Image (tube, rainbow, N blue to C red):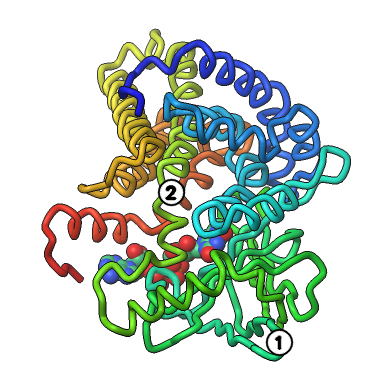
Amino acid sequence: MTTFSLDPGPDQIAVRDWLHGFAADVVRPAAAEWDEREETPWPVIQEAAKLGIYSLDFYAQQFFDPSGVGIPIAMEELFWGDAGIGLAITGTTLAAVAVLANGTDEQIGTWAPQMFGTPEDVKLGAFCSSEPDAGSDVSALRTRAVYDQAKDEWVINGTKTWATNGGIAHVHVVVATVDPELGSRGQASFIVPPGTAGLSQGQKFKKHGIRASHTAEVVLDGVRVPGHCLLGGKEKLDARLARAREGARGGGKNAAMATFEASRPAVGAQAIGIARAAYEVALDYAKTRVQFGKPIIENQGVAFQLADMKTRIDAARLLVWRASWMAVNNQPFTSAEGSMSKLYAGETAKFVTAQAMQILGGNGFTREYPVERMHRDSAIYTVFEGTSEIQRLVIARAISGAPIR
Ligand SMILES: Cc1cc2nc3c(=O)[nH]c(=O)nc-3n(C[C@H](O)[C@H](O)[C@H](O)COP(=O)(O)OP(=O)(O)OC[C@H]3O[C@@H](n4cnc5c(N)ncnc54)[C@H](O)[C@@H]3O)c2cc1C
């Protein structure tokens, strides 16, 4: 275990500066175009792949960096560049984390690299948990996986929604119920390999923000996957289900929740990237925009807004770094520190980007300046990976031990 430190060390600083260069030179200049086009920015992902930024190796290196803050630093810089493109570049990691959290070593070795492809032939991964009637309430999933023992295959039927990269991904990770009576404890995650018959993309959503990231329904109609596509394997699942049926406490972790726990600080760091970007634009603007014969920052009313924005960004980053360090060092989240970090960072991004629009006045309301896009992008950070209300629920339960609903 490493000691928690606010100095990420020379290696992480070098990575931060490298990513900042990519975000400033490649991502930021392309942001407005891909936001308008509402399409996956393949050329930017390819460029990231060529540089080694879109690769399993890169994320694995950051994830296992002993400082514990490799992933938050990487996310903050990429999303400082642009959140829509940032999510197009990093959306695959949600599926990869699902495999890392629930898969065997062999499954990780087989499927995680395939989600990224190669710099010459870039691929994507998608994590499909949410359904039309099961968003915050993950226990209500209806997508059903039934084991066909004769063929050693799982047959999956259902409709997933809101899947980042859904339908355009090479590899889909699908959470399905194998025993509906057990609620979330009766669920498992499955790999759906490339080209599997029966998986198709449903509606692609037109969104308020992060429009360069593809979000769509995924329809699973009689999808058959080999037995080895059950993440973690059948033996482990059977043991977990048996414990759950006996009503044993701690009968194994819920598949979707295990993924979310591991990824919340990273999502918080994305929100910080957006907030920092908007804050910097607003600070520059406030120093140069002159009204009543002086720069508007010389008004306490404007300067105090910037002071609050910077304070909240730094506070959010401290929460995210702590949670990320705890996760890497296997520290138990006794007060739901992962949820705390995502809650505070998501709300900070919405607050800071709204304040930035206000500081830019009429310009803040136009697409000539990036803060309106940043504000639109920030709005998802109080919704996905658990809404702010759900984060509060998780924290409240953790600190009280009470069955709060
Ligand atoms: C752009 C985008 C990308 C996404 N990417 C993915 C993805 O890749 N994979 C995936 O599986 N999912 C993804 N999601 C789904 C996302 O995680 C869900 O939208 C989110 O969990 C909320 O679910 P819901 O939309 O059904 O809202 P609901 O659960 O219906 O919530 C509606 C409102 O009720 C509140 N609420 C619900 N229950 C409670 C409660 N108990 N107490 C207090 N308030 C409550 C919520 O906080 C919210 O304000 C994505 C969503 C979007 C919009």
Q: Which residue does the image show at 75% across and 52% down from the upper left?
A: 114
402 versus 41 height, above or below: below
Which quadrant would the N terminus be assigned to in this image? top left
Tag 2–tag 1 contact (CB < 8 Å): no
Q: Is residue 145 visible?
A: yes
Residue 139's mark? none
107 versus 228 height, above or below: above
187 versus 298 height, above or below: below
* Disc on the earlier residue, 2 or 1: 1
**What's the residue type where badge 2 is placed?**
Ala
Q: Which residue does the image show at 42% across and 30% down from the upper left?
A: 68
Q: Is residue 174 left or right of residue 33?
A: left
Question: The residue tagged with tag 1: helix, strand or loop?
Answer: strand
Location of residue 153 in the rendering, given as x and y in whole percent from the top left corner: 69, 82
Ligand 1 has an atom within 8 Å of the beta carbon of the residue at disc 2? no
Which quadrant would the C terminus be assigned to in this image? bottom left
Which residue is more in the foreground, 266 or 304?
266
Question: Toward which corner of the image does residue 86 lie, by quadrant?
Answer: top right
Q: Which residue does the image show at 26% across and 22% down from the upper left?
A: 304
Q: Is residue 137 left or right of residue 151?
A: left
**Label 1: which residue?**
222
Question: The residue tagged with tag 2: helix, strand or loop?
Answer: helix
Question: Toward which corner of the image does residue 260 lie, by quadrant?
Answer: bottom left
Q: Is residue 39 visible?
A: no
Location of residue 369 in the rendering, given as x and y in whole percent from the top left corner: 59, 31
Residue 262's mark? 2
Location of residue 347 in the rendering, given as x and y in whole percent from the top left corner: 34, 44
Residues under labels 2 and 1: Cα distance? 31 Å
Location of residue 131 in the rendering, given as x and y in whole percent from the top left corner: 52, 75
**What's the residue type where badge 1 is placed?**
Gly
Q: Callout 1: few (<14), some (14-19), or many (20+) C-alpha neighbours within 10 Å? A: some
Of the four image quadrants, the one with ligand 1 is bottom left
